[in-house]
Image: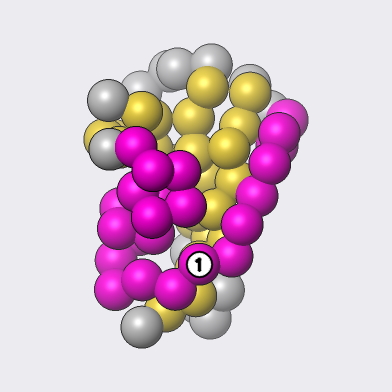
Amino acid sequence: MKAYKVEVMSGDVATSYKVVGAETAPAAATKATGRAVRDRRSEIRWIRLTDEEEWVVFKYAFT
């Protein structure tokens, strides 16, 4: 299980964050927010995930 830093974003500003363990980035986003996610396009409210081990950044939006 990997550790992900999950940040809820409003534009370029992080409004909250949690560190959660999950098998995949989408699973971490869902676990941290309690909502389903999809790939981000250009939404104002979105989720930024950082893989704490490999420093890879993922971007998702709420469905």
- Residue in the picture at 58% in, 37% down: 8
Left or right of 43, for residue 50: right
Q: Residue furthest front?
A: 34
Magenta span includes 26? yes
Left or right of 14, for residue 6: left
Q: Which residue is mark 1?
A: 20
Label 1 amino acid?
A: Val
Magenta-highlighted residues: 13-35
- Residue in the picture at 53% in, 16% down: 44
Q: Is 17 or 54 nearer to us in this picture?
A: 17
- Residue in the picture at 36% in, 71% down: 22
Q: Position of residue 36 (x, y in %)?
A: 28, 38
Q: Give the tally of numbered discs.
A: 1
Eyeballing the image, is 41 above or below 26?
A: above
Q: Position of residue 15 (x, y in %)?
A: 71, 34
- Judge whether residue 40 can be spotted in this image: no
Eyeballing the image, is 57 above or below 11?
A: below
> Which of the 4 image quadrants contains residue 28?
bottom left
Q: Is 5 or 12 nearer to us in this picture?
A: 5
Q: Secondary structure at mark 1?
A: strand
Crowding at label 1, few (<14), some or many (≥20) Cα neighbours within 10 Å? some
